[in-house]
Amino acid sequence: MKNRLILHIGLPKTGTTALQSFFALNSNALVSQGIKYVSNSHLAVNLWREGEDIKRSLSVWEDVRKITKAGKYDALVSNENLDSYLFEHPERIDDIRHSFSDADVKLVIYLRRQDIHLESYYLQTIRGNAITTPFGLDFIDNMLHQNYHNYEKKLRFFEKHFGADNIIVRLYDWKTFHSGNIFHDFLHAINVPWNDHYVHPPRSTNSSIDARMKDLLLTANATIPEAGNQLREFKELINVVEKFRFVDRETKLLTLQERKDFLAECKTGNDWVGQTYFGRDELFDCSNVEDLGEPKKISEQDMYMLMFFLNSAWIKGVGAVPFPVYNYLKIRHLKLKAAGITGAKKAVLFLRVGIHEILHLIKLYIIPTNWPSSHLEKTTMHYIWKNAKLWLGKTDNLIDKRTDD
């Protein structure tokens, strides 16, 4: 009897992060039941890239090959992007099948109702990347591949390359999970019994941002530079502030009519999947579609409070920094100002920079500033405003130049 190569291929936003945390946390318990989890599975898709990424990916697949070749354990690879990469590069499927001809290759894929998946995927993408693409029904199609949400086409493709008996399809819906839990559900799907040695990982923090924050995030993606992780730091601040304002999370982006039309487009394919893999006519429960209603919009009060919380969180953060924030910002301001002038004025400004840097160094040792105060807040915000004005002026000039070209 051949050992198995179990490829958990996605989809994204179907509990993959939680499952991977579970696999890593319970690696020893899995080994005791004949499963070896490949902990660097996140590098597996680099095989489709170039340079050093390919070498790292080949190393992952070689680790997998050693497991299956030894014949003692099944190998488990979990990567939510394998679905798209395999679909776009069928030639790599031949490579995998050839390399693991002595193993039974099994694919596990979780499907989520298309309208909900699209909304969740979009919000996660603009939160985690510098994406500026407006929301739309074809967002994922344009990012990854055409007909991404045509589950029938997707599964027929994998059936063709791996065989229908080797495709394990599960639904990302707590109502359908075995024992009401995704960890139980996955182990049940691959015929591994649950035992008391398995533990649940901490609750996942990989949640999508509130849908009402969409436009703010798109604006940030378009205007805040990624250099120096400035965009990431802003989004981390947004994540904290969001919790203060949006207690009742909004996940909807589609209007009710858009949702109905989208699900109608998917119905034929979904019915095939339901009949083929679950022995029923309907794949997903759509009884709540009318109840979902229209998406909530951000109000003026919401936006005001967001700006208030952002300002408050930021200033309290800098007030806790153990160095003189005022001096630091003033030095930065003088450097920004000097960049736009020449001659004697520039030399004078750089002389002032030098003086303030000396003072800054001295104050590191003699002035405690790891406490917020009204004076510090006033002086800090003064130079934040001045620096922002200088930076925005440079940005406007760059935009004008791009437009002229």
Image (tube, rainbow, N blue to C red):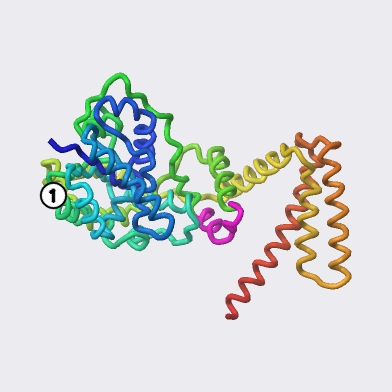
Secondary structure found at label 1: loop
From this view, report whether residue 113 is shown above or below residue 221: above
Q: Quadrant of the N terminus?
A: top left
Q: Position of residue 387 (x, y in %)?
A: 74, 57
Q: Which residues are magenta?
A: 215-229
195 vs 113, nearest the viewer:
195
From this view, report whether residue 287 is shown above or below residue 161: above
Q: Single out the residue that lies furthest toward the bottom.
A: 405
Q: Position of residue 324 (x, y in %)?
A: 79, 43
Residue 393, image quadrant: bottom right
The structure residue drawn at horizontal position 70% and vertical position 39%, both measured from the top left corner, is: 316
Q: Position of residue 104 (x, y in %)?
A: 17, 42
The structure residue drawn at horizontal position 86% and vertical position 49%, both measured from the top left corner, is: 358
Residue 185, image quadrant: top left
Q: For residue 87: magenta? A: no
350 vs 77, nearest the viewer:
77
Identify the residue under disc 1. Answer: 163
Does the magenta stretch mainly form a helix, a strand or a loop? helix
The structure residue drawn at horizontal position 75% and vertical position 37%, both measured from the top left corner, is: 322
From this view, report whether residue 237 is shown above or below residue 228: above
Dot 1 surroundings within 10 Å: few (below 14), some, or many (20 or more)?
A: some
Q: Position of residue 378 (x, y in %)?
A: 79, 46
From this view, report whether residue 346 is shown above or below residue 162: below
Q: Single out the residue that lies furthest toward the top.
A: 196
**Residue 70 visible from this viewpoint:** yes
Residue 153, image quadrant: bottom left
Residue type (three-letter) at the residue carrying disc 1: Gly
Left or right placement of residue 229 versus residue 326 in this view: left
Left or right placement of residue 31 versus residue 303 in this view: left
Q: Quadrant of the C terminus?
A: bottom right
Left or right placement of residue 214 versus residue 340 in this view: left
Q: For residue 224: magenta? A: yes
